[in-house]
Amino acid sequence: MGPQVDPVASDRDVPAEADVVVIGGGIVGTSAALYLAERGLKVVLVEKGHIAGEQSSRNWGWVRQADRDPREFDLIREALRLWREFGAHGVGDTGFKETGIFFAAHRSEDIDGYRAWVKQAAASGIAAEVIEGAAVRAVMTGDSAPPPAGLWCASDGRAEPQKAASAIALAARAKGAIILTDCAARGLDTAAGSVKGVVTERGTIRTGRVVLAAGAWSRRFLKDIDVTLPQLKMRSTVSRTAPLAGAPTAGIWDGVIGIRQRADGGLTLANGVANVAALTPDHFRFGFDFLPALLSDWRNVSLSIGGRFFQELEDWPSRPYDQPSPYEATRVLDPRPDKRFLDTTVAELKRRFAAFEDVRIVQAWAGYIDVLPDVVPVISEVDRCAGLVVATGFSGHGFGIGPGAGWLVADLVTGTTPFVDAHDFRLGRFSDGSNPRPMSRL
């Protein structure tokens, strides 16, 4: 069972029409709803389950610039600004705090790679540095075997995934947005290549503009309007510990160690390298597209096959919109956590940090990360379906960038000049011969 999310009650009535309908109640969808409502549009957000029920509440809670793909530099820089400014938009407590984030480096080639990254980031206005020796020990408080060096971005921080999207949704409602939970969007009503409405399980909402921010469900939703998105799912496991004293306050990545301090005094804890590719039919459809990403990180990806493969096979055929959809059959994706990955992390923490000697995991959960071949999101209009904007494929780092993605979506929906260059986020890069690849890893 996933973590407990701050609840957002549903509005009761489904309006007959709206200026824009947002499909998906995660960090990106709620942010888009907020910024669109602030621009004076009549916004309706529909969510098949509850707000932040899937990956937006199940992630690490990092708000980071460090080690980003350069294609995301401008967007994450502006997203961090928006995190700081949420209060001015009426957003309540998200738990955001600047703590700094550290990526350890053990080999000389890693250190050289991070130095090169720092130079690239500086050109986009992101301040970071490679630290060594005493500076590393100051960040890795209590580590008996600290790495020799690492990438340090002091302005990075964290927020609380179980609070953030809910706080943003409530702010959007205060600006006039209607929030409908337990209300699945079954599909789009289209005509002559344009959006005409959204068909939900509770009726059709007429609209000429739609935002699809459906995370791991986006591929399935788009295929019903003959739009191909090469998107796969990766299963990642996260946990939280009981409160403890003496742990580092910074976010830390060091191989199997992935930690960040929580507002409740505990830690969000995850294995920093382990993920599972739970095989589905789409892994065979898009295997070649994802081969470069797999080859760059093959040591850290485990393959498995199970019930999800057969469930997606059953869910694949299109269904009439007057019949229940797969989105109603599975309100929340809630996969089983992989305890063996957490055990490895806990053992390493206890070996290196005295403060973790009595660490106790009180809850573990898993989630499905929506991944694209180049590990860069799609935030884009859809050429063959006028009025549709897609924001998905954040590949495990959408929480921190979410407010920026929401603002960019609002720009695209309203025809405003985008506040950052959106070229690298276009959907068409997967069909125009660009052959996008993931950032070269260290």
Image: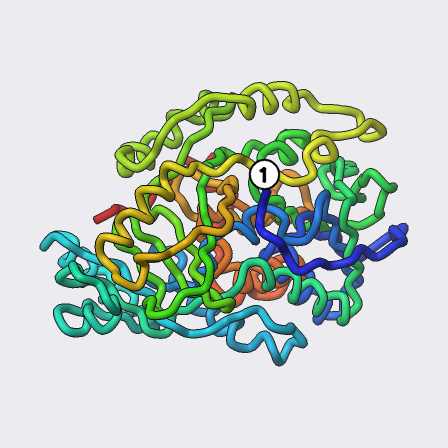
**Disc 1 residue type (three-letter):** Asp
Q: Where's residue 314, x and y in %?
A: 64, 19
Q: Is 298 left, or right, of 27 in this rendering?
A: left
**How many numbered discs, if any?**
1
Q: Where's residue 90, x and y in %?
A: 67, 76
Q: Is 116 left, or right, of 267 in this rendering?
A: left
Identify the residue under disc 1.
Answer: 334
The residue nearer to you, when weighing 413 against 127, is: 127
Q: Is 435 left, or right, of 79 in this rendering?
A: left
Identify the residue at the far front of this view. 358
Please name the residue shown 39% across and 49% down the image.
Answer: 270
Q: Where's residue 43, x and y in %?
A: 77, 59
Relative to 41, say whether 237 is above or below. Answer: above
Please name the residue shown 46% across and 25% down the image.
Answer: 279
Q: Secondary structure at mark 1?
A: loop
- Residue 75, visible in the rendered structure: no
Q: How is the image coloured?
A: rainbow
Q: Can you tell which quarter of the image residue 149 is in? A: bottom left
Q: Where's residue 3, x and y in %?
A: 58, 51
